Image (cartoon, rainbow, N blue to C red):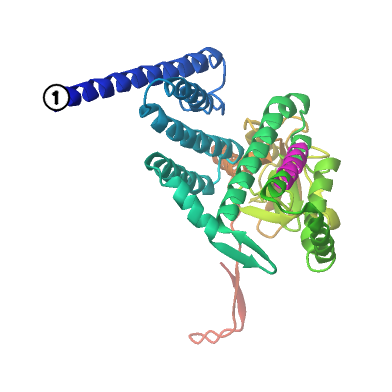
């Protein structure tokens, strides 16, 4: 009799597992089909659909919803095992996908995103395991029993964790909305890169502020107490943080006035380069040799800055050479201007011109003036190419480059005792 009962229990267990497995497979297939259908024309960096449909946020979200519905339907007529395990697993996967894909989209070059993603993954999977084995309620109860005193108020560790999680979710969703507005609306409506930057920063700051207020309200923080904090912050900005506040305000003024924009070639003090990015606190200026300077925005407002791209994109370069006194002036000028005109980066208007600048004891000094329109691609490389062409042209024409003469005065000749004499070498 006991053997028949064991056989019956094993058949029932096998039958229930088969039903749950079929239901779970159907839920996953339905979620994949919906994501596949609506994600056909979506970009690869889509947060909802991802690159391969199943690596987006929508697939685990739909699978979670369908699996929970199936669990509620199956639990009425048989025990539930697989679907009960699938719900926390899919919920953890939703949390990981939400944080990982949003942060990678908003901060694509940040090295901190990978660390945050791994931390969230560990916490999510640990929570899923505790949920599955039934230890999550006791753990939450223990955390709720641990209270921390902050002045006259006491807050449990569970409340702190829940508040941090709620704030993180709200802030990530705010970042997601800001990134979507920037990508779908600002890129088409605002063509100027600087204006798009200031609009994006303003929208992101506003949404983060709203999200933070919602998160604090959800935790139970009295928002009326923030008025005292706001007054203290104002005093701090007026005293100790005035420089920092000035840089932030100057950053928005620069972006709004567009006196300098991303891509302009500027000269700040003695540093010259191309503006690669305008942050709210500082501006990045990259020189042609690869060096990058971090310039506080207040300096760009209060000090003298030369915008080499605002008035004229043409950039003047010069190179000088000294030839012998007997050289043909017109021939030398023709060789120099021809060498400059042969370079593709040298513009034709104004045309290259060579001048006889000085008569030196060594020879005739000529200076070549030419203009380029792309100084961000480098100046020394085009000057070097022109110098090489000039040297080859002078050699072909038989014109020698003058050599510096040196005077040596010999005051005493011990061999013949002759008077002081000058000797030219």
In the image, 346 versus 209, the foreground residue is: 209
Q: Residue at x 70, y 31 (%)?
A: 182
Instruction: Give the magenta-colored segment's residue range.
Output: 199-213
Q: Is residue 347 above or below residue 162?
A: above
In the image, 122 versus 300, the foreground residue is: 122
Q: Is 396 colored magenta in this rendering?
A: no
Q: Is residue 34 left or right of residue 3?
A: right
- The location of residue 87, given as percent across then percent down, is 45, 31
- The location of residue 47, given as percent across then percent down, is 56, 29
- The location of residue 233, given as percent across then percent down, is 80, 61
Q: Crowdedness of circle 1 by 10 Å Cα count: few (<14), some, many (20+)?
A: few
The C terminus - image quarter: bottom right
Q: Is residue 422 above or below residue 74?
A: below
Pointer 1: what residue? 1
Q: Residue at x 40, y 43 (%)?
A: 134
Q: Residue at x 81, y 54 (%)?
A: 224
């Amino acid at each position: 009799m006991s053997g028949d009962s064991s056989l019956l229990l094993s058949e029932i267990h096998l039958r229930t597992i088969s039903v749950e497995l079929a239901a779970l497979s159907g839920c996953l297939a339905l979620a994949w089909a919906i994501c596949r259908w609506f994600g056909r024309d979506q970009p690869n960096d889509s947060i909802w659909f991802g690159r391969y449909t199943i690596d987006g946020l929508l697939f685990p979200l739909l699978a979670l919803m369908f699996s929970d519905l199936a669990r509620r339907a199956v639990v009425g007529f048989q025990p539930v095992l697989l679907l009960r395990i699938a719900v926390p697993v899919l919920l953890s996967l939703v949390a990981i996908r939400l944080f990982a894909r949003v942060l990678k989209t908003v901060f694509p070059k940040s090295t901190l995103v990978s660390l945050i993603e791994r931390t969230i993954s560990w916490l999510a999977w640990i929570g899923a395991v505790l949920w599955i084995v039934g230890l999550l309620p006791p753990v939450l109860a223990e955390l709720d029993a641990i209270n921390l005193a902050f002045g006259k108020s006491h807050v449990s560790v569970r409340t702190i964790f829940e508040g941090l999680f709620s704030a993180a979710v709200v802030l990530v969703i705010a970042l997601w909305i800001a990134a979507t507005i920037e990508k779908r609306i600002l890129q088409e409506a605002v063509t100027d890169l600087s204006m798009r930057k200031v609009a994006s920063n303003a929208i992101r700051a506003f949404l983060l502020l709203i999200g933070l207020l919602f998160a604090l309200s959800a935790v139970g923080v009295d928002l009326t107490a923030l008025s005292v904090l706001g007054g203290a912050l104002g005093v701090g900005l007026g005293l100790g943080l005035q420089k920092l506040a000035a840089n932030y305000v100057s950053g928005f003024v620069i972006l709004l006035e567009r006196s300098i924009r991303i891509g302009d070639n500027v000269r700040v003090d003695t540093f010259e380069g191309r503006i690669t990015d305008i942050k709210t606190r500082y501006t990045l200026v990259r020189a042609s040799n690869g060096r990058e300077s971090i310039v506080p925005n207040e300096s760009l407002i209060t000090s003298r800055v030369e915008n080499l791209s605002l008035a004229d994109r043409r950039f003047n370069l010069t190179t000088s050479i000294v030839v012998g006194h007997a050289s043909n002036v017109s021939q030398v000028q023709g060789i120099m201007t021809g060498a400059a005109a042969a370079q593709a980066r040298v513009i034709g208007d104004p045309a290259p011109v060579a001048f006889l600048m000085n008569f030196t004891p060594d020879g005739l000094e000529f200076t070549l003036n030419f203009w380029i329109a792309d100084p961000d691609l480098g100046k020394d490389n085009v000057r070097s190419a022109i110098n090489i062409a000039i040297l080859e042209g002078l050699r072909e024409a038989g014109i020698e480059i003058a050599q510096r003469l040196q005077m040596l005065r010999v005051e005493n000749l011990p061999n013949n005792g002759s008077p002081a004499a000058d000797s030219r070498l």
